[in-house]
Image (cartoon, rainbow, N blue to C red):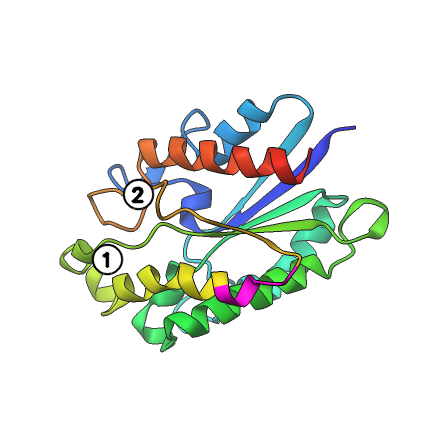
Amino acid sequence: MTKTIVCFGDSNTWGYNAEADARFDESTRWTSLLDSSLGNSYRVIEEGLCGRTSVCEDPLFEGLSGLSYIYPCLMSHSPLDLVVIMLGTNDTKDRFGMTSYNIAQGIVRLAVKARGSTSGIDGKSPEVLVIAPPPIGEKYIHTSIGRPMGIHCSQKSMELSEHLTTLLEGTDIHFVDSREHVGMNEIDYMHLDSDGHRQMAELVHQHVRHIAN
């Protein structure tokens, strides 16, 4: 039986190419690379949205909170074997006023909601894998995204994985810290380049094989 995986995230799951201000094609996006590498026994569904947060309602743009969308999203794709969640980068925006710990709390809340859904096989719970995204580079503030993002985004994103490690300890939710394996680009310092997508696909592949084998 084919195993179904939903990858739920933001622009780095959607595949935003900062150099071209467009979307990477299917031969580049980590979700597509993951799908190809896993073979015919798996089906990877892309659920990336630029600007998506874990729990924050954006006062400037509608429909970006993952918390309000994840349940109908997962149920529409059910039955699922695994939900991969990679969020937190957009939550660092200054306008949300969230500490790094708050952001981690939001991601865990979202993951618990996904784990508690009946979108798994035979109406059971799907497995959930949370990925701490690569940290935002300090030089982001000097790029075009610096003003809309605001201050301290890099610092908050650097602290995120530590808090997620603590908050997810003892739960049945899987966790991987991408910080040591994947880096952001050197254009806006908060999006993956083609090498980053390849690295992310390789990292997630290892964990998917272990969780949903």
Q: Nearer the viewer, residue 180 or 152?
A: 180
Q: Nearer the viewer, residue 169 or 44?
A: 169
Residue tagged by mark 1? 145
Q: Nearer the viewer, residue 174 or 80?
A: 174
User: Which label was assigned to residue 183?
Assistant: 2
Res 67 quadrant in image: bottom right
Quadrant where the C terminus is found in the figure: top right
**Which amino acid is tagged 2?**
Gly
Q: Give me the residue at 59% from left, 37% from top.
A: 208
Q: Secondary structure at mark 2?
A: loop
Q: CA distance from mark 1 to mark 2?
A: 18 Å
**Which amino acid is tagged 1?**
Ile
User: Which label was assigned to residue 127?
Assistant: none
Q: Around disc 1, counting alpha carbons within 10 Å, would you say few (fewer than 14), some (14 to 19), or many (20 or more)?
A: few
Q: Give me the residue at 18% from left, 60% from top.
A: 141
Q: Give me the residue at 34% from left, 39% from top.
A: 22
Instruction: Please say whether residue 62 is visible from this viewpoint.
Output: no
Residue farthest right in this picture: 122
Magenta stretch: residue 93 in it?
no
Instruction: Please say whether residue 57 is visible from this viewpoint.
Output: yes
Image location of residue 190, percent across then percent down: 29, 51
Residue farthest front in this picture: 170
Q: Residue 122 vs residue 116: left or right?
A: right
In the rendered structure, which segment of residues is drawn in magenta?
166-171
Q: Residue 40 vs residue 198: left or right?
A: right
